[in-house]
Image: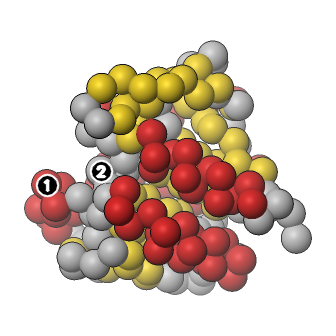
Amino acid sequence: MKKNIAILATNGFEESELSSPKAYLEEQGWNADIISLKSGTIKGWKDGNWSNEYNVDVVLDQANEADYDALVLPGGVINPDLLRREEAAVNFVRAFFKSKKPVAAICHGPQILVDADVLEGRKVTSFFSVKNDLKNAGAHWEDSEVVVDNGLVTSRNPNDLPAFNKKMVEEIKEGKHERQTV
């Protein structure tokens, strides 16, 4: 069955954490839209430098969670910090949890989950430097390449992408998760 997946990102996303999941989702025959704050392109980050630009498919203020089966949140130090400052981005993320849809976040990507207030009692992982932020938001953090908790998929860094992509697709195929909630 064809799926529509939202990838929420803005300038400063870790390039591999957007490009690899997007390609993997498209290999499934699914649509993966890059959703961002403004139209045009967003610029990736790779090896400590600005990298390639990616076309924005849908501007956030025109995006509707109801049009998507799941959400992917790439990391990078800059990207999640910029997104979590935007109420529309936080509300978009929260809407996926309210609808019990799968959400996959990697590296620094889970930072926006703190602002969406969806981590209480959830098992997660992330880049080690945001571990305490996630714990302070009520999450149970562990150092594993991928952690799955009722439709929420998290990973630590780009080295974990093969496991992250596989589990992300598995959770999306399962569909809504009754325990995936705010």
Q: Secondary structure at mark 2?
A: loop
Q: Which quadrant would residue 144 be assigned to in this image? A: bottom left
Please tell me which residue is depicted at 62% across the width and 50% down the height of the picture. Answer: 22
Q: How is the image coloured?
A: secondary structure
Placement of the C terminus among the 4 image quadrants: bottom left
Residue 145 shown left or right of residue 177 in the figure: left
Which of 118 and 123 lies nearest the eye of the viewer?
123
Q: Residue furthest toward the right?
A: 1
Q: Residue furthest toward the front?
A: 47
Residue 124 shown left or right of residue 178 in the figure: left
Q: Is residue 81 above or below residue 154?
A: above
Please tell me which residue is depicted at 38% across the width and 78% down the height of the picture. Answer: 147
Residue 87 shown left or right of residue 70 in the figure: left
Residue topped by disc 2: 108
Q: Which quadrant would residue 142 be assigned to in this image? A: bottom left
Q: Position of residue 122 (x, y in %)?
A: 33, 77
Residue topped by disc 1: 129
The numbered mark at residue 84 is none
Please tell me which residue is depicted at 71% across the width and 77% down the height of the picture. Answer: 173
